[in-house]
Amino acid sequence: MAASINLTHHFLIAMPAMEDTYFSKALVYVAEHNAQGALGVIVNRPIDMTLSALFQRIELPFTSAKLANLPVFFGGPVQTDRGFVLHRPLGAWQSTLTVNAEIGLTTSRDVLQSVGQAGHPSDMVVTLGYSGWASGQIEHEIGQNAWLTVPADPRILFELPYEERLASALELLGVNLANLAGQAGHA
């Protein structure tokens, strides 16, 4: 693969042969990809925690009944004790990685305070941890057929239940999940 690819605002779709248990059947949203490496969050692997339980754990007020039962996700194996909020609209938070004009990945507490008190941004995926790759690592893994890539669709991130995200991302490529899984039982 050319070193000049930019996978920012793309999905990484784990191939069925992926042996790394962190990424097996994972759909990763890439929030940043540059010469230093890549950073993303897994958006289809909920953990046994709701948003209201997370807020209770970090001692923040939570008044949004509409968002209370949203799942918190395992974002990846790096900094699993730290929260990451993938959201739209972009907003003006203290510590946001701007993905594009619409989407940001925020790590500062102020975004959570707004979610807890005002219910905004309501289009969000909250993760504990993130996924990171060193310079050239993701390109190498793609070259080894570990991942499929496709430009991300915000509708999949923010409007679909997590159970449908992986199959919907594959549909962007014209691939059916059942067919992809059927090819890989021999790893």
Image (cartoon, helix red, strand yellow):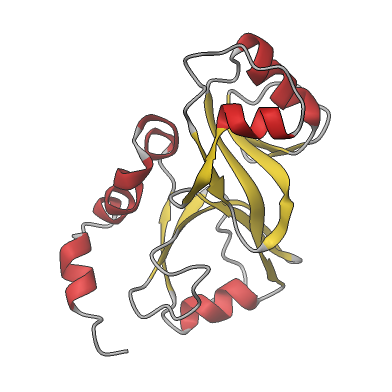
How many tags in the picture? 0
Q: Horizontal and vertical percent for residue 64?
A: 56, 13
**Vertical side of 77 occupied by 101: above or below:** above
**In the image, is 96 to the left or to the right of 30?**
right
Q: Quadrant of the C terminus?
A: bottom left
Q: Horizontal and vertical percent for residue 19?
A: 45, 81
**Vertical side of 187 occupied by 59: above or below:** above
User: 55 or 32, which lies in front?
Assistant: 55
User: 28 or 69, which lies in front?
Assistant: 69
Res. 23 in view: yes
At 53% from the left and 68% from the top, the residue drawn is 22
At 16% from the left and 68% from the top, the residue drawn is 179
Q: Horizontal and vertical percent for residue 130?
A: 65, 55
At 43% from the left and 50% from the top, the residue drawn is 44
Q: Horizontal and vertical percent for residue 136?
A: 66, 76
**Vertical side of 114 occupied by 127: above or below:** below
Residue occupying the far right of the picture: 94
Res. 102 in view: no
Q: In the picture, residue 115 is in which quadrant?
A: top right
